[in-house]
Amino acid sequence: MQGPYRSALQTGYVVVSLRSHVHRHKSRIDRFLAANIGNLGTYAAGRITITARTSARCLRIQWTYKLPDTNPSPLRPLLLAAQNTAWASERTGKHAILLCYHSMSNSSSQHSSLAELRALSRIIQESIDAIDACLTTNGQEFPSPDTTLTMESEAARMASDVDRQCSLIVSAAYQLICSVRSPMASLVSVATQYKVSAALRVALEANVVEALREAGPKGAHVSEIAKASCVDPGKLARILRLLATNHIFVEVAPDVFTNNRISTAMDTGKSIKALLESPTTKYVGTTGVAASVGHITDEGMKAAAYLAETLLDSNTAQSQEPTQTALNLAFRTDLPAWEWLESKGNEHRLARFAIAMDGSKNVAPPSAILEGFDWKGLKDGAIVVDVGGGLGSQALTIAWNCPHLHFVVQDREPVVKEAEKFWTDQFPAALQSGQVRLQVHDFFTPQPITDASVFLLRNIIHDWSDKYCLQILRHLRNAATPDTHLVIVDSLVSYACEDDDLKNIPGAVRPVPPKPLLPNMGHAATAAYQIDIQMLDSLNGKERTVKEMNTLMEQTGWRLVQVHQSTTFSTCKVIGVPS
Ligand SMILES: C[S@@+](CC[C@H](N)C(=O)[O-])C[C@H]1O[C@@H](n2cnc3c(N)ncnc32)[C@H](O)[C@@H]1O
């Protein structure tokens, strides 16, 4: 045994340190591994495979690996293959030095938890390096948190490679926080999160973002900001301080606040004068982000407050009915959420919800609806029915990109009225030419379009319990031709553990994130699980797993043929054909 190996073994580590090309040392490493550790891995100049072992006490391998100039992605196979392995890389010029720690079965728990912290921090570092490489290649800048948000300036973050690395960072960073913060502090932090939500709604309704925009880059004292509403300045300062402490707004001097990138995401773009003159049209003509924040922090949060009462009451615990939800309890109504939204006194909520739904397309890249299904490959004049299409914003994106298709956007009567205004504003020619038709239709009744090429259901299935989804899907199946495709667009939720059962469904398996991240990407995926609870508390609906979608299809005469996975909210696709 040569020097460094022997001394490392004596201290509980094996160190293979190679400062030049790996392949030159292959036979030496293989001999060493065979003699000391067994068949741990094979090496080649451009490719490294590690097989996880449980019998090794502890292995640390350090070697140089020649990287392409810009992209460190060849490191990924190593990451995926090295089960139970925390890893990291540092880029040094054209070479990366990888450190790979193989957990020891007899290592102390204190040591392994520190190794986990290091592993998480390395994932963050590696992802930043990868973002750096992508942006350099694309000639883009990463958007600074201190700048004002525009959709164009988000383009760099939305590029799929960058988006994936950002998700890894979010997942690792939150796991790191939960690992280092005291458990009591973590629980209290989570239990009091609703205070942040409540404060956010105050800032939204008090027109703070718009007041700060008008104040300019130096910001404004809270006594000025408070003039955009009737909120007491002293109380508003406390609201804004809580938000600034959570990186929404910046307190630049005592009681003086400015906008930042996150706060400007809910800028309606309107003047304070216009907002005060016409508060009911606040969200009209906006991106929908402010409307979403309003919807979630108003009826969403109030409904969630009654979740335990609903789930633990034996009268409602097993219910699949949209009239026996936490929202029903919170707002003391017997109406399902859709009818409640349409009832007198809720006009502002209905309008806000429609705009929020339309704006949800901005959370994902605009092209998200176009991915995972071959819209362009549909024949000339093929009919796409956007079932429960809301204003029809998905149909609009497809129509812009596929002028050879025809569309029928169906919804409830009050929504269709809103949709008429939307299309008249956005794409009047499509209405005039008949390329797009708006149709009042209740999807619990027989489907009138019997020659559709596609039935599109975006954010519909998640609104309903199984009992009702079966009715919707059966009506569509009865109206389908043998060539009709069913395209369900929703957020597919994964288990928070590994799931080997998906391998037989094309497209269903998601890339496995590096350990020790959770297999479902943890905090980076949390929005889907939060929306799942929103579906539960307001509709008795749910976000589903691939298997749950498959079961619904099997029971209604559809056969699941393809899944298109995505980590962004409401952009997964489950595609079926008549069975
Ligand atoms: C969550 S929104 C989704 C809207 C649209 N698909 C989208 O992705 O933007 C659900 C839609 O279902 C509609 N809806 C609810 N019940 C319905 C019914 N019985 N028949 C038709 N549409 C209905 C609602 O009015 C609402 O527009």
Image (cartoon, rainbow, N blue to C red):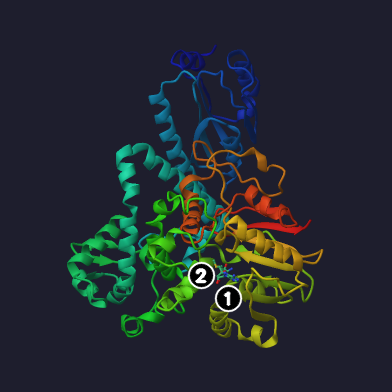
Q: Secondary structure at mark 1?
A: loop
Q: Report which residue position mark 2 lands on.
A: 338
Between 83 and 505, the one lying in front of the other is 505
Horizontal placement of 374 versus 95: left or right?
right
| Residue depicted at x 72% and y 75% | 448
- Whether residue 170 appears in this view of the structure is yes
Residue 200 drawn at (x, y percent): 33, 63
Q: Quadrant of residue 186?
A: top left
The answer to whether the beta carbon of the residue marked 1 is less than 8 Å from any atom of ligand 1 is: yes
Residue 209 drawn at (x, y percent): 33, 71
Asked if marks 1 and 2 touch (Cβ < 8 Å), the reply is yes
Q: Amino acid at mark 2?
A: Trp
- In this picture, is 557 found above or below 356? above
Q: Quadrant of ligand 1?
A: bottom right
Horizontal placement of 388 versus 325: left or right?
right
Between 547 and 365, the one lying in front of the other is 547
The answer to whether the beta carbon of the residue marked 2 is less than 8 Å from any atom of ligand 1 is: yes
Residue 231 drawn at (x, y percent): 23, 72
- Whether residue 287 appears in this view of the structure is no
Q: Report which residue position mark 1 lands on.
A: 412
Quadrant location, the C terminus: bottom right
Instruction: First in sequence, mark 1 or 2: give its number.
Output: 2
